[in-house]
Amino acid sequence: MNESNYKRAIFDALTPEYDDMLPQVENEHTFSKGFEKRMDKLVKRRSKPYYMMINTAAKRAACIIGIILIASFTTVMSVASFREAFKSFIVNTFEKYSVVRSNDEDSSVPETIKDIYGISQELIKDYSVTYEEKDDVSYNITYKSSNNRIIDFSQFTKNEFDIAINTENAKTITVEINGYEAMFYTDNHNYNHLIWDNGDYMIKISSNIGKDELISMAETVQKVE
């Protein structure tokens, strides 16, 4: 028997036995609508030009981000983390990222984006819009100036606010935005970030402008007429 026929004989003899050893999946797993919605938002967020500039996660494989996302749906405290509670949201800080969730259980808050909020037009008159997206539970718009100053504004419903942020080697502090407690941090790409609850929605502004200028800009955020 030549080598080719010998290999074929071994393959034919062992394949049925190998198939019998494999576990049989009787029911196909179905992900929840909430999981699928968050995965859709993650894919959209990764497509933004701004995302590539400020998120180290963008440099990782998509499967790693998926693992992080799945972990955030289960018990985040099963991994060693620092848990910090703000008035309206909770931050679980891990080694290279943090998971931020709304802590507001008020059932009267909007469940969809009914009103759009935005930065004062006077402050962004020299910027052009490079990205804009709106769905039922979030709104995002990115501005860029001629001297490469970038401002990314995001608005979320509280019941859907569950995001992972890049806090590797970052120190978070508390500041005040129009009487509301806000989380401020600078990531390892030297972008500054503010996250706060304005009473109805969660707001996030990220930019490569300075801290004081970013805070002043955040204080102009109001409902767009």
Image (cartoon, rainbow, N blue to C red):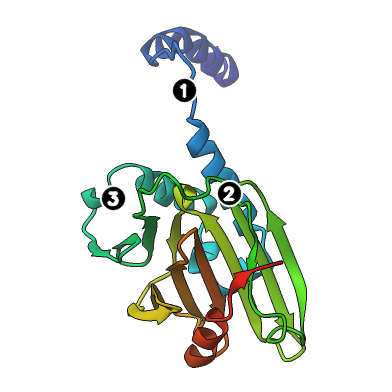
Question: Mark 3 falls on what kind of element?
Answer: helix
Q: Are marks 3 and 1 in contact (CB under 8 Å)?
A: no
> Label 3, on which residue?
76
Distance between mark 1 and mark 2 Cα atoms = 26 Å
Give the residue type that dot 1 points to: His
The C terminus, quarter of image: bottom right
The location of residue 150, given as percent across then percent down, is: 65, 81
Q: Please state if 109 lies on the left or on the right of 173 as rendered.
A: right
> Label 1, on which residue?
29
Q: Which one is nearer the viewer's eye here, 43 or 179?
A: 179
The N terminus, quarter of image: top right
- Looking at the image, is mark 3 or mark 1 nearer the viewer? 3
- Looking at the image, is mark 1 or mark 2 nearer the viewer? 2
Give the residue type that dot 3 points to: Val
- Looking at the image, is mark 2 or mark 3 nearer the viewer? 2
Distance between mark 3 and mark 1 Cα atoms = 23 Å
181 shown above or below 99 = below
Q: Which residue is pictured at 77% across the width and 87% down the height?
A: 126
Question: Mark 2 falls on what kind of element?
Answer: loop
Quarter of the image for residue 222 reads bottom right
N-terminal of the two: label 3 or label 1? 1
Give the residue type that dot 2 points to: Val
N-terminal of the two: label 2 or label 3? 3
Q: Which one is nearer the viewer's eye here, 195 or 82?
A: 195
How packed mark 1 is, by other alpha carbons closer than 10 Å (few <14, some 14-19, many 20 or more), is: few
Q: Which residue is pictured at 63% across the width and 57% down the height?
A: 115
N-terminal of the two: label 1 or label 2? 1
